[in-house]
Image (cartoon, helix red, strand yellow):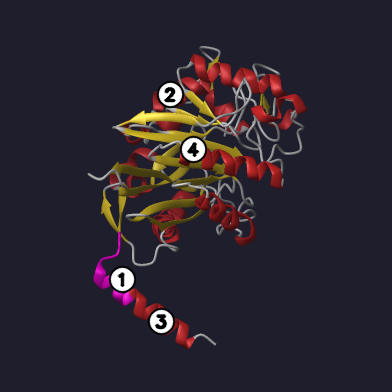
Amino acid sequence: MFHHTQLHRGWDPENHDFDFEQSFTYVKDYLNKADITLANFETTLAGPMGALMYVPETHVRGYQAYPTFNSPDEVLENIKDAGFDILLTANNHCMDSGIEGLDRTLEQISEHELLAVGTSKTAPASPLYISMNQMDISLINWGYGTNGITIPTADENRVNSLLNYREDRINEMLEQISQADESGVDWVIVAIHFGPEYKTQPYKNLQEDLVNRMIEHGADIILGSHPHVLQPMEIRYRKTVDGEEPVFIIYSLGNFLASQPWRSYRPYETDNSIILNLTLELDSQERKYLSNVEIIPIYTQWNSQEIRVVPVVYALSEPGQKILGHSNEDARRLPWINEYVPSHMLSRMPGYTRESHGDILTLVPPTEENEDELAVNQLEQQVEAP
């Protein structure tokens, strides 16, 4: 997302254009290493004065932030340079500049040689099929709604919106998942924009129930967004004819880049998140498995010139402290974030531990000994429970 605080800092008065390169300086090496890097793109690119609403307090040189986001085209140059390949466009801000703004957003994404999924210029908004490393992947993207902005009836199937969790739209999403699973692809990845904002745990009767239904219809990986804060990860195992296969879930990836700092009057965990790295593979019998799950805890750092994403471990290092010049708030928050993020991420993955490799934390599955100990502990907890 690009709030007005980012737009102000991104304006280059000498060249009379915008430049957000500094936001990605400390993470672009990690983003460029992956075969495919994707992100939720929660704004529109409708050109100057293209947003549906004009709000002077959040308007910067023809572009708009909250409540209807419309950003300059230059953001795509910086996003591509940072290493992103695919943008998820089905979210509650995709209609912030109307259907014309949605179309222009997709045109600009294509012109910048990036891919988009979740919305489409032609009906319907289909999954994105990817072939890489001798694997076939279907990427599906849906969002819960559009903040009350009406999608024209003729264009409803160009926007993968659940229309505020309408059952017929949920069934359309599940049918997309089933069709992808039955098509013979190796992995079905679902990116879904859902859940309550600023809640660090998923809602059982909403997010967890939807996740269960998606898994039943064939989803292998579920990537959640919208709450603006991290929600935990899970790894489950689904029975197959010849054994079992993993299902990975993260209920919310939180904010990657969105200028929502922690404040005592708004104490939400909006300034910290992760870069998630999943390594997908097939074994010799064509069975899918996750060979590696890594997270890089990150922090959104502010100063008067920049709003930038920084790996937490680097920010805490001596070189990082010298170069970044932490505020008192940074110095207070960073050590806590360094412990909170991995602990929170692993809170629904009993038996998993973490290994530190610089900025990167690798998640280590439980061993047989750990599993036995865990089973005993769980049994004791069940016996002791009132």
Q: In front: mark 3 or mark 4?
A: 4
The part of the image, by quadrant, that contains residue 143 is top right
Q: In front: mark 2 or mark 4?
A: 4
Residue 371: mark in rendering: 1
Residue at position x 46%, y 52% from top? 249
Contact check, label 2 and label 1, Cβ < 8 Å: no
Residue at mark 3 to residue at mark 4: CA–CA distance: 39 Å
Membership of 65 in magenta stretch = no
Q: Which residues are magenta?
A: 365-373
Q: In the image, residue 110 lies at what x, y percent? A: 51, 17
Q: Nearer the viewer, residue 304 or 237?
A: 237
- Helix, strand or loop at label 4? It is helix
Q: Residue furthest top?
A: 15
Query: Mark 4 highlights which residue?
Result: 180
Q: Amino acid at mark 3?
A: Leu
- How crowded pointer 4 is (Cα within 10 Å; few <14, some 14-19, many 20+) is rated as many
Query: Mark 3 highlights which residue?
Result: 379
Q: Nearer the viewer, residue 173 or 262?
A: 173
Q: Amino acid at mark 2?
A: Lys
- Residue 12 in view in this figure: no
Q: Earlier in the sequence, mark 2 or mark 3?
A: 2
Q: Earlier in the sequence, mark 2 or mark 4?
A: 2
Q: In the image, residue 383 lies at what x, y percent? A: 46, 87
The kind of secondary structure the magenta stretch mainly shows is helix
- How crowded pointer 1 is (Cα within 10 Å; few <14, some 14-19, many 20+) is rated as some
Residue at position x 40%, y 28% from top? 82
